[in-house]
Each structure stands twice: as structure tokens, then as C-alpha cells.
Image (cartoon, rainbow, N blue to C red):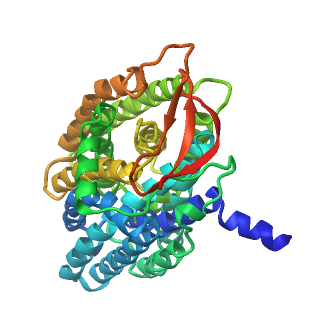
Amino acid sequence: MAFNRIARFYRSCLFQIIVVGLVAFCEPGIWTALNNLGAGGNASPFLNNAANALTYGLMSIGCFLAGGVTNKITAKWTLFLGAALYTPYAAGLYCNNRYGNQWFLLLAAALCGVGASLLWASEAAIAVGYPEEKKRGRYVGIWMGIRQMGPLVGGAISLALNVNTAHAGKVTYTTYLGLVAISSLGAPFALLLSQPQNVIRSDGTKIPYMKKTSFVIESRAIWKQLKNKYMLLLIPVFLAGQFGQTYQSNYLTTYFTVRSRALASFLTAVLGAAANISTGLILDLKYFSREARSKAMYVFILVFVTASWAWNAATQTKLTRMPEPPAFDLGDGTFFNSAFTVYLFFRFFYEALQTYIYWLMAEIKGAQGDGDVARTTGILRSWESIGSTIAYAVGATHWPNQNQMILGFALWGFTIPFTLLAVFGNWNQPGIPEAEPEIEEQTDNSDIEGQRVVITFDGKDQGQGLPISSK
């Protein structure tokens, strides 16, 4: 009896999300922790940004193709390969910090770009595609919340080792050893993942997945998704959403001491996890329609992310007017408190935005079967990578922080009308009368497993428990 319960939990959606979260914790989570600590050797952020630009440049192409790879070799093995190729990056930062080695860091960044392409597309496809609709928000929040444990652990290690480092500069090389060890656990964790046909959803429905695919099938399906108007409206927020992170990283490295940066990394992880999980839970509330939740959440996030950028702009203007950049340390007074708090404020609402847009991505009609969820996540994360490539390329130059802040703020403003159209428009809804529900069957002649779903005019499921299989 106990064995059956354990076996059922092992095959549950929740366990799959925990596994994906653990992989994300070990790889992109630790990667974020490393970048939050600032540059590796010689206390220069420019090499670090150049390495990140190389990583994201490869991801811009790789993520676009990774959805097809996921459909071909399955999400489990795509996730495993992606995690394995992440680990050298942490080792490259260690060698750069201790020995000043630069070529290994750039090589590791290239390997990370390939690995991250595979991991980003597959983890998002699992987190969005595996859960049943009524639990999708909380599961996306759990995935991203566990991911925040990477910066949390990284920040705790760095804070413990650098608590007496009350000056600007590089962290001690021993900081990186623990992060390298954690990063090496990502690939083994990926092996715990179940294939979609073996996963047990709580409502008894099956997860659509590709049994067989080819280059021609993937090319046609990707082209079909590229013409999806709803997805096209989401491209700007994915493109520009990552830009603020680069400015924030340079802001922290330029104006704060090592132990202040370590504390910021620790606190932003705690706040980020809280933002991810709370946003996911709110998006799953049953008291309001899905449409009402979506609109209210976006307006809330829009107001506070804009306020965060405005506060950052005011703080950056004061910092730019100083004759020399300060090295803020803990307890340095009112301006330190404001400059430090705005960083935390921005990161909290940035994480809320990330959880929301991944939940919103799952709302794309026609993207939950025939392997389209992997393709869609790959395409959107490709645009996310393009935005990050531009951001890190700008960060790798000696362009002033003030200009980077202005560009980031302007790009955020650029995303607003497109996202408003996606959220408040009718792009993702079938044109059906209010009194007549539409029956959508995800079956055709392709080699997939599907399910019958009855969708009412407000987009809610009715009677999801009729699993079917295409022949």
C-alpha cells in the first residue's frame, strides 16, 4: 500500500514539477547566483557580460530549434543534456576568479549556450504542458520558486565567506567551489523525470505528446506557431523582459561592496521565491474567472514594474551626478537604504512578471497538443534569449549605467501596448455563441496522444475525463 502511494507520487505532476525545479535550481538558478555575485576575475563586469552575450547569442538560435529536439528525443533527455552542458560555466568562473583564465570561461559560456537552449525549452514545456489547467498557476510558481533556491544558496555561501569583505571587488574563489558542486547535480536530477505517457494527472486526463516526428513535421508546425497572433503579441514582453536583469547586475557590481552584493543575492532569492509562488496561487484562485484573474494580475504587475523602473531612474540619476561611484556597504545611511531597497523591489516584481508570462503562454489556443507546447516555449524563449543577448552585449561595453537604465525603461514601455492587446483582446478565444459550448478534440492522423476537452464560452473545462488515443 505504501509502495503504491510512493509510486503514484513518483508519477504525479507535482513530482515532475519538483524535479524540473531541482534541475532549474542546480543550473539556471546557480547560473543566476554566479552572475549576482558579479564578475569573476579582476573585478571586471565586462568579461562576464561578454560571456553572457555569447551564451544568449547561441540560445537565440538554439531555443528556436530546441522545441523540435524535445519532441524528437523527449523532454526528459533534452533536459538531461541541457543540464550536463551547464556545469562547465561555473567551473569557468572559478578558473577565471582564481587564475585569471579567460578562454575557458568563454568556452564554457558557449557550451552553456547550447545546454541552456535545450534546458530552457524543455523545462518550460514540462512546467506548462504537464499540469492540468486548474493547477497550472501554482505549479509554474513552484517550478520558478524552487529555481530561486539557486540564488538563495549562492547568496548564503557568498555571504558566509565574504561577510568581512567590506569593499568592492571580486568574491573569494572558494565561493565558486560549492556552486560548481551543486551545478553538477542537475543532470542526475533530470533522470528522475517521467515520460509524459507515464505521468498521472489528478483529474485523470492524459498529457498530449509526440510519438514520432521529423524535420518536415517540425518545420511546418513551427511555421504554424509563428503565425499565431496571440503568440506574436507576447514576443515583445519576452524580448524585453530580461533586459532589466543586466542593468541590475551592473548596478549592483558598480555601486556596492562584496558583502552587500552577497546579501542582495540572498534576499532577492527569498523575495523571488515568494513572488513566484504567491503569483501562481493567485492565478489559480477559483473565485474569479480565468480572464478576470489574467487582466487583474497584469494590471497589478504593470503598475509596480513601472514604479520600480521609475524609482531606479531617480536613484541612478543621483548616482550618476556623484563625482566618483560609491561603494555602498551595509549601514551606510539613508541613500544606501534606498539604493539597496529599489534593487529588491525591482527583483520581486520582475519575478512576479516572469511567473505571469509563463502562465499566460500556456493560454495560447492550439498549443497544448501535437507537440506544440514544446515548440511554443522554444520560440518564445528564443526571443527572450535575443533580448538577453542585446542586453549583455550592451553590458559588455563601457556604456554608462545611466544609458542602460534609460534603454531598459524604454523597452519596458514598448512592451506594454502589445501585452495589453494580448491580455485584453480576444485573440485566444474561439468565436462561439455564449450559450453553445465548443467541443475541441485533439485528435488527427498524427502520432500523438490526446484528450477530449469541452470548452465553454468563458474558457473553462467541462468534463475532461475522456482520454482518447489517435491511431
Residue closer to the observer: 362 or 412: 362
Q: Quadrant of the N terminus?
A: bottom right
Q: How many marks?
A: 0
Which residue is at the far right?
Answer: 1
- Within the image, what quadrant is residue 226 found in? top left
User: 417 above or below 263?
Assistant: above
User: On the picture, is 259 further left or further right than 284?
Assistant: left
> Residue 388 placed where, x, y %?
26, 52
User: 70 above or below 201?
Assistant: below
At 51% from the left and 79% from the top, the residue drawn is 188
- Within the image, what quadrant is residue 254 found in? bottom left
Residue closer to the observer: 432 or 248: 432
Taking the image as drawn, is residue 319 in sight? Answer: no
> Residue 46 placed where, x, y %?
19, 63
User: 272 above or below 84?
Assistant: above
> Residue 151 placed where, x, y %?
48, 62
Which residue is at the far bottom?
Answer: 99
At 45% from the left and 28% from the top, the residue drawn is 298
At 66% from the left and 60% from the top, the residue drawn is 12
> Residue 348 placed where, x, y %?
49, 43
User: 200 above or below 384?
Assistant: below
